[in-house]
Image (tube, grey):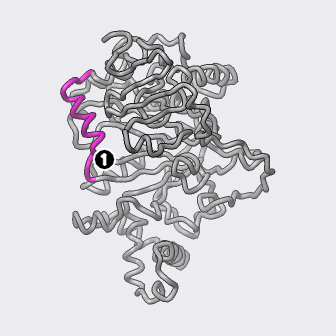
Amino acid sequence: MDRIDRSLIRIMPDGTEKHVNPFTGTEVWFIPGRKNRPIFTWNAPSRRPLQKQSPENYCNFCPAHYLNTPPEKARLVYRDGFFQTVEHVAAESLSNEEAAFRRIGNLFEIVTIDYWKKNFNYKLTAKNRAWKEAYLSSEAGRQHVDAIVHLKLSYSGLGEEEIRALSWDARIELADAFFGGCHELVVPRRHHLDGAEWESQLASSGEMTPDEHDLYFRFTIEAVEDIHHNNRYVRYIAVYQNWLKEAGASFDHMHKQLCGLDEWGVSLERELDMAYRNPNIYNEYAANYAAYNNYVLCENDHAVAFVDLGHRHPTIAIYSKSINCRPAAHSDLERRGFSDVVHAIHAATGSQISCNEEWYYRPFDSTIAIPWHILIKWRINISAGFEGGTKIYVNPITLVELRDRLVPRLFELRSQGRIGPMLIAEECPVKPNSLQYYKNDFEN
């Protein structure tokens, strides 16, 4: 492959940069002077003093409002000197112990439990049925579930009389979504930073410590596996994080979403087909391509990050180097190394830039090896009529400008001890074919 593959990137005499994503075919242009147009959605830090509350009660995800969300499927707590997962906390015990992370059903599912019931005759597992019965056996549990069902129905447009006209059995049937639904949220404890003085000091992924971020990953991966084991019809689980309103978030309280699907989706199907025809494609057109063109941001023994081409929004890709292709198959050391690099990119991005974090990995029923990788997309530009009509997307920043904005920040964060150990920019060895996924014939 040439140092610059002319089929993927062209730099015109006037400075216009045109690039195409090799996996999706998305075409992107950077046009000089276009970035001066006021299209950025970057959020200026608020200088309004924070009205401190303990426990935090700024939104329904905060610790003061545990009863404003569906019953907990699990929480991560600190006991006896280490963090451990506790499942199915009773309603009357929710506030007895601080949860570092909570796992709850999404009140507004994309793929609903009715979808699974009506299309696949899906039923709650024996374990989840027993949990539902136990939760409803207490007065506190019944009141909690009834209140959340009422809230869901009211948001769906039903009036008070219509809701009260529903029988208890009908209302409790709707609660199956809380106990066995396949669209979930993983919610960290903090809304604002500990010791925050201003409203803008939100607790984003990059504001976590590397240890906290790895716990966040570990707990999310546990949730992925649990959804898969509880619904035999789930073929893939979309994992993503929307940070701030411009990225699609309903609350400014960080959280990941996990949505079970009965298909892979057109984009992933395309990538799997390409990987079948060329097993080394992620090295050739991702990691190697970034290395040859000086787009690498940072790397450690287990992951590499680089600016990625051909996305609607400025995008950073982070790839696992592991032979393992699914998150749960990664060893603790591999997961931690991958988490450290993802965390470093979030930290360098900062908490004031809206962004999406998207996970990609080998589907449960695929024998084709693809590496676990994450894309972090900066939502700093808004697609408009030109993009919709031409399918050519205009970015406000070049690949090199994105790299040069992040690299100095990464050096600064490393010197402050705020990110994990890693090499940055020109320090990186960028060895060819560093992604080892293609050696994986099949994993259970």
* Three-letter amino acid code at the position of disc 1: Tyr
Quadrant where the N terminus is found in the figure: top left
Q: Is residue 362 above or below residue 341?
A: below
Residue 152 lies, in percent from the top left, at 48, 72
The residue drawn where x is 69% and y is 48% is: 192
Q: As rendered, which of 421 and 199 lies closer to the eye?
A: 199
**Residue 242 sits inside the magenta stretch:** no
Give the overall secondary structure of the magenta segment.
helix
- Residue highlighted by disc 1: 236
204 displayed left or right of 431: right
- Viewed as shown, does residue 429 lie left or right of 114? right
The spot of residue 118 in percent (x, y) is 25, 68
Residue pictured at 37% horizontal, 39% vertical: 390
- In the image, is residue 275 part of the stretch drawn in magenta? yes
Question: Front-most of 38 and 221?
Answer: 38
Magenta span: 262-280
